[in-house]
Image (cartoon, rainbow, N blue to C red):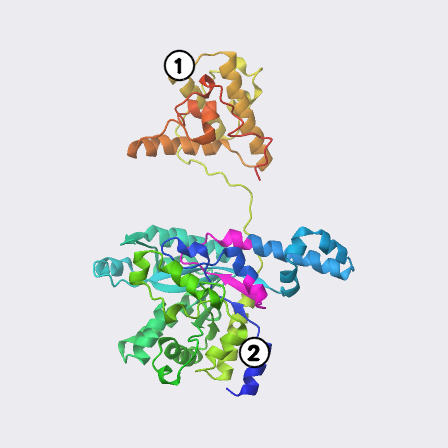
Amino acid sequence: MKDKDRDKDKNNLDFMSTHNHTEDSNFRLKDCIIRAEDLVNRAIELGYKGVCVTDHESLSSHIRILQRYTFLKKLKVKYLNAVKNNELGEIEKDKDMKKNLSLLKKMPDDFKLGLGNEIYLIDDMNDVTVNYESGVTKHWHFILIAKNKKGHEQLRQISSQSAWKNWFRQGRVERVPTIKSELENIVGDDKGNIIATSACLGGELPNHILSYFRDGNQESKIKIHNFITWGINTFGKENFFIELAPTLESPQEDILETHSQITFNRNAVKIAKSYGLKCTVATDSHYLEKDHRKVHEAYLNADDDNSNNRELGDFYATTYMMETEEIVELLSSHLESEDVEDCFKGTMEIHSMIEDYNLSHSVIVPRDKNIPDFEVVGLFKDWYKACPYIKLFAESEDIQERYFLYKCEEGFVNKKQSLNEKNIKRINIEMEEIWKSSEKINMRIAPYYILVEALVNKIMWKVSYVGIARGSVTGFYTAYLMDITQMNPLDYNLPHWRHLSSERPLV
């Protein structure tokens, strides 16, 4: 690449970072030292147009990072309005604006956040079973990024229905593989909601490309074709990208022909063109800045397993959030200028596909679907006038609320409780809290207690001992009657409101 062209690229290339990790990638193995919130901050500082979070088979950071992103987006609008109206004094008064001022000034108006997952892709669980003892099982890395809310729903299904269903432990490492056929079934005919990339050198496609072009394995040629065909068929051609990565801090001419990442990059560009696919470039970030490399290495070496079994050299040398100029320079050691530019354009193609969406929703209370036939006995019928909320439960249109009362009646008899004012009014008070709280969140809460009662009595007691009480619910008399707890709070004058009060905000 000519120096003049390179300078032009450095100054003008827009970039979205599409492969990054946070501390939630540490669930199964020490991996990353980036806080979710800092991922967004650093991307803005570097002038990126956006950033994607793609933890190792984990969606746990999504809410936190989405909250940070949404907060900054709203604050940016507020800041721009203050500038437009020449109300600069308002910026000084606003603690949030003042604290984040440097980010707000740098944050592009079209900055976007991508929520994704780096899954472990396999053909079949039989491969895992066959190779488990030998220790050579391959769980290929693969990147999925949700375009929209529907795409995120598919990510959740892939993670929970596929990966976690196939969970197993190999030594001290948790394995959560996703079977290709199960992923295909979840995406189904509803393509176009997920973007997929081939991921780092731990991916299947990079391994097949290296096997063929570096090692001369002729069988890998058909494997390259099969994998690319699978990606196109599963996600759609426009949604499937081949991911390149910058490599080497100081490229040396004598290793350009043999270095794994360089060999992959050069040949991946050619293969992408032959299939009409786009390439992207990503840093697979595990730490924020170049100077943090030693800290990251020390973190990975913090236990014997990692120091004995992890590559801590070249693989992690460039896995940080880089200036775009540095990415250009490292790619330019072995790629043509137009190929480098196309990689950046590929990241912005992903940027254009990602929609802004919110994952917030109203409270969802799970319900036990296996309620047996029952009939409210009317044990407290004489108290309905003085205790109107017991009456509301008895006559409720919701079967779960009637069942809640039925279980209280049953427990009242079994535990030989006295039909006195103290006991009955306590039931009414607690039912009042449940009823009013249900109305407040527009979701019936009684089903939650029904489900917990089933878990305790139908599952937990069968496999282990159950403690006599669990936290604030110890103060709920109805929980005692339902055998969720085994300690009568009225004997100890325990208040109900520590567990539930309709006066506290629930949403």
Q: Which residue, given by chain and number where applicable, does mark 2 sit on?
A: 10
Residue 440 as seen in the image, left or right of residue 270 = right
Disc 1 to disc 2, C-alpha distance: 80 Å
Amino acid identity at mark 2: Lys
Q: Which residue, given by chain and number where applicable, does mark 1 sit on?
A: 416
Measured as percent of width and height from the top left, residue 121 is found at 35, 62
Q: Is residue 45 magenta?
A: yes
Q: Nearer the viewer, residue 145 or 17?
A: 17
Magenta region:
42-66
Residue 56, quarter of picture: bottom left
Q: Is residue 463 magenta?
A: no
Residue at the (53%, 64%) spot, across then down:
51
Secondary structure beneath disc 1? loop
Q: Within 10 angstroms of label 1, few (less than 14), some, or many (20 or more) residues?
A: few
Is residue 243 shown to the viewer in this render? yes
Nearest to viewer (mark 1 / mark 2): 2
Question: Which numbered disc, 1 or 2, marks the residue that appears first in the sequence?
Answer: 2
Amino acid identity at mark 1: Lys
Secondary structure beneath disc 2? helix
